[in-house]
Image (cartoon, helix red, strand yellow):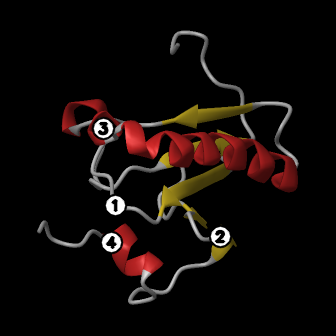
């Protein structure tokens, strides 16, 4: 079995973090190095290393994460304009190998990034 990530330790309560939301499938915390005024991480409890490692059995979980991202954006009052990012692999900027979604808002984003 692979080494536990910082996200697993947060989920298990071994590392404290301000949880903005949690349910039986995921947690939501503030990013410790925000790239926008609102920068939230939505993390599944199931430790999937990368999006590319998800399987057919993860379909419902992935859908749940997408719906929760919208719900959380509404709760934070940023549902009119937010960016949702999933980095897949080190060369894509992933630094913690436990699937997570970045919800960024509160600033204008460049049109150059699609």
The first of marks 1 and 3 along the sequence is 1
In the depicted structure, whether residue 8 falls above or below residue 86: below
Choose top left, top right, bottom left or bottom right for residue 102.
top right
The first of marks 1 and 2 along the sequence is 2
Q: Are marks 3 and 2 in contact (CB under 8 Å)?
A: no
Q: Residues within 10 Å of mark 3 (few under 14, many from 20)?
A: few
Residue 82 location (% of width, % of height)? 71, 34
Question: In this orientation, which residue lies closer to the viewer: 47 or 90?
Answer: 47
* Residue at which label 3 appears: 93
Residue 85's mark?
A: none
Tell us which disc is closer to us: 3 or 4: 4
Question: Helix, strand, or loop for circle 2?
Answer: loop
- Residue 35 in view of the camera: no
Q: Residues within 10 Å of mark 1 (few under 14, many from 20)?
A: some
> In percent of the image, x 61 and y 78: which residue is there?
18
Q: Are marks 3 and 4 in contact (CB under 8 Å)?
A: no
In the depicted structure, whether residue 6 falls above or below residue 101: below
């Amino acid at each position: 079995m692979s080494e536990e990530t910082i996200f697993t330790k947060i989920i298990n309560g071994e590392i404290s973090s301000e949880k903005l939301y949690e349910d039986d499938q995921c947690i939501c915390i503030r990013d410790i190095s925000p790239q926008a005024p609102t920068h939230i991480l939505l993390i599944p409890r199931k430790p999937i290393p990368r999006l590319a490692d998800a399987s057919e059995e993860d379909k419902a979980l992935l859908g749940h994460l997408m719906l929760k991202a919208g719900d959380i954006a509404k709760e934070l009052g940023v549902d009119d304009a937010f960016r949702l990012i999933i980095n897949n692999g080190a060369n894509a900027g992933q630094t913690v190998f436990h699937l997570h979604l970045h919800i960024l808002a509160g600033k204008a984003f460049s049109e150059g990034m699609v």
